[in-house]
Image: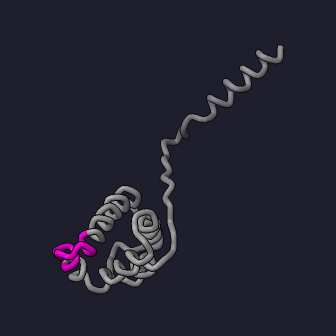
Amino acid sequence: MKPIYLVTILAVLAGCGGGSRSGSEYQVVRTASGPISKACMASDRKARNPALCGCVQAAANVDLTSGDQRRMVGFYRDPHEAQEVRQSDRSRDRDFWDRYSAFVTRAEGMCAGL
């Protein structure tokens, strides 16, 4: 009797795990605070909001060192600085740009629609 009872309970619980019937979908977005989030919120960009800036910071925490993040803050103040780094021949700048590109790809995926 107990095995049938347990199987029935498991079947009922498994049926409850489906989605919602209202069609609403929720997206879980990671957010964080830090230098990039603060620079983002202080910027004059129209699309900025706490959720987006926090999400960008969370992506940066994965791909960029704290030094990289401080360097990137300068891009908010002077976007031309990013162009100079991208076109630089120095190996340090190329290495940074590789990490920065990985960060951008991650941030686009994580933060789309915010």
Q: Which residues are magenta?
A: 84-94
Which one is nearer the viewer's eye here, 93 or 78? Answer: 93
Q: How many marks?
A: 0
> Where is residue 98 shown, x and y percent of the image?
28, 65
Residue 32 can be seen in this image: yes
Residue closest to the eye, 82 or 97: 97
Residue 52 is at least partly visible in this image: no
The image quadrant where one finds the N terminus is top right
The one nearer the camera, 105 or 9, is 105
Residue 4's place in the image compared with 114, above or below, is above
Residue sticking out furthest to the right: 1
Q: Residue at x 25, y 75 (%)?
A: 93
Residue 91 highlighted magenta (yes or no): yes
Q: Would you identify the image quadrant in which residue 107 lies? A: bottom left
**Residue farthest to the top, as pictured:** 1
Q: Which of the 4 image quadrants contains residue 85? A: bottom left
State the residue at coordinates (18%, 76%).
88
Q: Position of residue 47 (x, y in %)?
A: 35, 72
**What color scheme is it?**
one colour
Which SS type dominates the magenta stretch?
A: helix
Furthest-front residue in view?
Answer: 91
Q: Is residue 78 above or below residue 23?
A: below
35 lies left or right of 99: right
Question: In which quadrant of the rendered view does residue 57 lie?
Answer: bottom left
Q: Quadrant of the C terminus?
A: bottom left
Instruction: Tell me if residue 103 is in the magenta stretch.
Output: no
Q: Position of residue 46 (x, y in %)?
A: 33, 76
What residue is at 68 percent from the left and 31 percent from the top? 13
Q: Position of residue 106 (x, y in %)?
A: 36, 59
Q: Which residue sits at x=48%, y=42%?
A: 23
